[in-house]
Amino acid sequence: METVYYIHNFKGRNGGTLFRYLLPSVQKPLIIFTPLHETHIQAAVICSEQLGIHLRIRSGGHDYEGVSFASEIDHPFIIVDLVKLRNISIDIEDETAWVEAGTTIGEFYYRIAEKSRVHGFPAGIFTSLGMGGHITGGAYGSMLRKFGLGADNAIDAHIIDVNGRVLDRRSMGEDLFWAICGGAGGSFGVIVAWRLKLVRIPPTVTYFMINKTMEEDDIKVLDKWQHVCDKFDDNLLVKVTMQATNPNEEGEINVTIKYQGLFLGKASRLLRIMGRKFPELGVSRKDCLEITWIESVLYMGGYPNGTSLDILLQAKSSFRTFFKAKSDFVRKPIPETAITELLKRLKQDSSVVIFTPYGGKMNRISESAIPFPQRKGTVYMIQYLTIWQDGKKSEKLHMKWIRKLYKFMKPYVSKNPRSAYANYRDFDLGMNELGNTSFKKAGAWGYKYFKGNFKRLVQIKTQNDPNNFFRHEQSIPVLAM
């Protein structure tokens, strides 16, 4: 087994370095293991359990609260980093792929495109994320309205359980397989690999981007988007990003709004759809690019024009800053007055708000099909981010801003529970304590992430890991025995 010992300034490999967890005051791992084979992981699990040393699992380093490489509840701890496990085996005839957990989304997309122009996979747009943890939380992306989530398209897995056994879907059983497909990572075992169902896409897709400043007329356009975004043709996704700009010479902060569209088809049909459903946006032929799906991955991921596809193999993120994020789900359009107030608040902080539309296939999958429950009736998901560069110096101000924004949005988002996305982990919703977790306390965040599926996740956790070996600040708890 290859090992890397204590590293003082341990940095995330990909998925965005979480600088808040790299400060000197944050506890660092005792040892980082980088296994080359699943047997090495088995040894690490068995040794950690016997020695009473806590273990954290890292396949991409993209966890928003750093639970894959930091700990606020267990010391000492080690990290099993799956960075070396990156084999990809694609069977185009069978339309499936085995993907090891350390593989990034970008690598997977690239290898699919090498094999076929008419196959893809419906996972995330940030291509430096590790596949192991990404699928465990659901994995949504620009094709979710057509094909659902990445986890909806998982058909098998290899997992190492608390006893060090390597299990596939048949040997782990349907309950455990259900739990790992959207029940969030780090609770049930170490995901070694996923078998995923590829999806068929047209050889030509169409991308467009429209930028606007947030004037009064633009607020009305955004309001119209809310009323149509989940009702478009399943082949079309139109995502909205609002971002506060850097202060100008007068110190004023403006807000820009970006509409990004991906249509699984040619521009002529896209324009007909937009003309009928959303003419207010004003999309024209000159705004449209007819490209391949793999090229659309770069555009949707925010890479500059002309970027080589080879960047997908680099497994690096350009997002290297301090940030805090939160999430919401919207079930009916929010009032124009609330949009106006939201824009005012964005001008007070270096911030980003992203609206991702639902509808389409997401409406046709049961809430209990996998642990991810935010399905029928969801119009769009919101992600809020506040971003800063100077570490602890201004952290309190940014944290205060995003928490006040989250409080302001409460009347306009889902209720009973107010839902959140598990892969945008948020410690503000509650944290586990050292040792066995209180089911009641964990429910504060568990029902927000998983709604009624949370109870089943707790039962499966109790059956498969009764001593709560695989745990972190928001892992699935066990029932008191």
Image: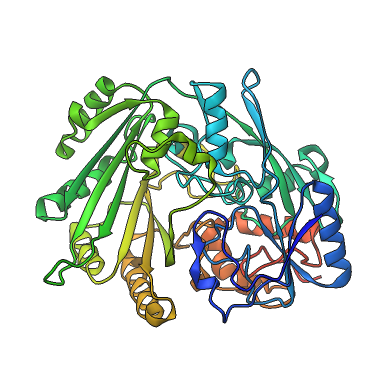
The N terminus lies in quadrant: bottom right
Q: Is residue 349 visible?
A: yes
* Front residue (pair 350, 159): 350
Residue 405 position, x and y percent, is: 32, 70
Q: Is 8 displayed left or right of 403 in the figure?
A: right
In the picture as drawn, the residue positioned furthest to the right comes out as: 50
Residue 63 position, x and y percent, is: 55, 60
Q: How is the image coloured?
A: rainbow
The picture quadrant where one finds residue 152 is: top right
Q: Is residue 149 visible?
A: no
- Count of numbered circles on the image: 0
The picture quadrant where one finds residue 95 is: top right
The C terminus lies in quadrant: bottom right
Residue drawn 36% across the image and 75% down it:
398
In the rendered image, the vertical position of residue 219 relative to residue 20, given as above or below: above
Q: Is 71 displayed left or right of 286 in the figure?
A: right
Residue drawn 67% across the image and 42% down it:
86
Residue 358 position, x and y percent, is: 40, 43
Residue 153 position, x and y percent, is: 59, 35
Residue drawn 27% across the image and 55% down it:
242
Residue drawn 86% across the image and 49% down it:
165
Q: Is 480 displayed left or right of 65 in the figure?
A: right
